[in-house]
Image (tube, rainbow, N blue to C red):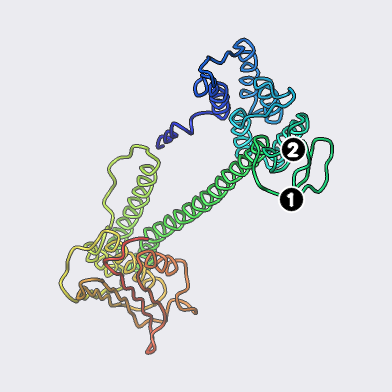
Amino acid sequence: MSATPTLPLLRRVSPGAWTALAWCASVAYPSVVLHVGTNHTPVHRDWVFIAATTVVAFTAAALLRQRPLLSIALLIAATLAVTDATRANAQLPLTALLAVDVALCLVTAAQPRRTSRAALALVLVLLIVHLGMAPDNTFGLTTATYDGAPAPGTVFVVDHFQLTTSLPHIGVSDEGVLAAVIAWLVGRSIRQSREHTEVLSAQLAAQAVTGERLRIAREMHDTVAHSIGIVALQAGAARRVIDSRPDRARDALTEIEAAGRETLAGLRLMLVALREADGEPAGTPAHLPQGLADLDRLAAATTSAGVRVDVQWHGERRPLPPEIDLSAFRVIQESVTNVVRHADVRSCQVSIDCRKEDEVSVEITDRGRGHGTTPGSGYGLAGLRERVALLHGEFHAGPRPDGGFRVAARLPLAGGAR
């Protein structure tokens, strides 16, 4: 079997690791970017307390997959503690919520919908409660302009919360709520994209399996049906002359043996091809008909079985693409087999037209009683129609107006397999 492809580096990082990295970035931001105050004096931070909250945050990151809601609650608690956002007049910086937003996005992308919605509700409730805890915070889009009086356009006021219709400015605390919603939407989009990709992959896999089953069925039918038809015809001939003409019966049995060996070789080659597709080593396959070069041998074997095959070539014989060459031969082989099994005639005609540079056409006709009551019926003809369609060709099969049956296929040389 083929080796599983290695995931890209970014996808090999676990959600907990991404959350931990986001926490480190949010904690380091004030020291790295804002390491100097307005008077160019270093900003002192309680690193022992920061280390303690970091332990809590890393514990939350480790629990992100197993306990996503508990993990997000711990992250919010650690964020509020490390920023001292519970004191009066405190604003919760947007950068401090980086780990919370990353965790919310990852939970939404990976967890069930109910869990993602509960996580969003938890974040929003805690952020809104924080907005109401600080006297200078208002819930809405007017936080930065609030001076103690109700903002313009306020509909009603409940404690520190205000519902307003005026939207002049986005405040710091409002940005945290907005960022949480955006993180949830991004995670939801990632989950929907992944689910859509999984559905498409499942459909493509099912189509591939169906196509492979049809291909194997066609090859099995094309490999076995002709030989079995020859075997049945020769066995019947041998039974009739075994007493009066033992030499003719011996020849018929020889043809039966050859047909049986050819069928076994075909089945063996098919198994070899399937094993090679699975990555297993296989031996050298026996010879099988691979194209129109084997048409003379097919005609000789069928003629010896009692049905003469008259082959006519039109145009110059030239090398054909392998899939075209094999498909043209399979059409002729199946059609001749149907003549032997169903037509009840002593001869049939095979025509190969190579006069056009961009296509090859084959036609098989007989003057027998037909191959069935419905034109184009039977698994063999259905398989031929599928084979020709895969090569963007045209296939026709049906009774002739003046009696007999006709099979015709046109295979373009430039189309290639779909």
Crowdedness of circle 1 by 10 Å Cα count: few (<14), some, many (20+)? some
Disc nearer the start of the sequence (1/2)? 2
Q: In which quarter of the image is the N terminus?
A: top left
Is 369 placed above or below 177 here? below
Percent of width and height locating residue 71: 67, 26
Q: Which mark is residue 414?
A: none
Query: Furthest-top residue in view?
Result: 48
Residue in the foreground of this view, choosing between 77 and 136: 136
Is 77 placed above or below 377 here? above
Disc 2 is placed on an element classified as loop
Disc 1 is placed on an element classified as loop
Give me the residue at 38% from left, 80% from top.
405
Residue position marked by numbered label 2 in the rendering: 138
The tally of labels here is 2
Residue in the foreground of this view, choosing between 328 and 230: 328
> Residue 230 vs residue 206: left or right?
left
Circle 2: residue type: Thr
Percent of width and height locating residue 21: 53, 25
Crowdedness of circle 2 by 10 Å Cα count: few (<14), some, many (20+)? many
Circle 1: residue type: Thr
Residue position marked by numbered label 1 in the rendering: 165
Is 246 placed above or below 50 here? below
- Gap between marks 1 and 2 measured at Cα: 13 Å
Is 414 placed above or below 135 here? below
